[in-house]
Amino acid sequence: MTFSTAGVITGTPAQSGKYTFTIVATDSIGATGSRAYTLTVDPAITLSPTMLPVATVGDAVDDKLTAKGGSGADYTFALASGSSLPSGLKLSSSGVITGKPTRSGNFTFTIVVTDGTGATVRQAYSLTVDG
């Protein structure tokens, strides 16, 4: 990550942790002021499993997705806008895909997980439903 002379922090953190730093500002006549800051970088949110097992038309599905990283608490699972599960299946906000698929095929969809601080991650999934 970098800090510009315009006072902008940019970049992607490479490591989680708490980072303390001091910013010193100097005005046009040379007067200075400083302030200490702490930046907390949470670990990236990851989902598992990364692949779903093959399902069969009419058979019950009960697949649990889990998240870790981020703030470490209060994960909410949802389908991304424009994404849908195969007919007969639903996703709970706690990350469980349940139901009985009603038709065969290869289906793709994206799941969005949000942690307690509002950080999100999107992961694409593919689900094969056999006839």
Image (cartoon, rainbow, N blue to C red):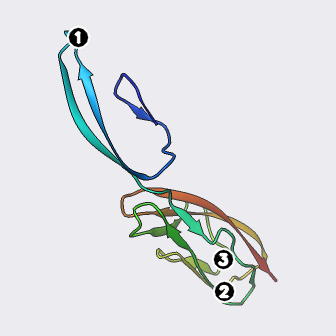
Q: Amino acid at mark 2?
A: Lys
Residue positioned 72% across, 68% down in the render? 107
Mark 3 element type: loop
The residue that disc 1 covers is 28
Q: Amino acid at mark 1?
A: Ser
Residue positioned 60% across, 60% down in the render? 123
Q: Is residue 105 left or right of residue 119?
A: right
The residue that disc 2 covers is 100
Q: Is residue 111 left or right of residue 131?
A: left
Measured in 3D between alpha carbons, the distance from the residue under mark 3 to the one under mark 1, in whole angstroms, is 65 Å
Measured in 3D between alpha carbons, the distance from the residue under mark 1 to the one under mark 2, in whole angstroms, is 69 Å
Measured in 3D between alpha carbons, the distance from the residue under mark 2 to the one under mark 3, in whole angstroms, is 8 Å
Quarter of the image for the C terminus: give it: bottom right
**Image height check: is 44 above or below 90?**
above
Q: Which callout, 2 or 3, points at the residue further toward the start of the chain?
A: 3
Q: 67 or 122: nearer the eye?
A: 67
Residue positioned 22% across, 15% down in the render? 27
Q: Amino acid at mark 3?
A: Ser
Cβ–Cβ under 8 Å for marks 2 and 3:
no
Residue 107: which disc?
A: none
Displayed quadrant of residue 62: bottom right
Residue positioned 65% across, 64% down in the render? 109
* Number of marks: 3
Mark 2 element type: loop
**Image height check: is 45 above or below 39?**
below
Cβ–Cβ under 8 Å for marks 3 and 1:
no
Q: Which x, y percent locates residue 49?
A: 63, 72
Q: Which callout, 1 or 2, points at the residue further toward the start of the chain?
A: 1
Q: Which is in the foreground here, disc 2 or disc 3?
A: 2
Residue 87: which disc?
A: 3
Residues packed near mark 1 inside 10 Å, few (<14), some (14 to 19) or many (20 plus):
few
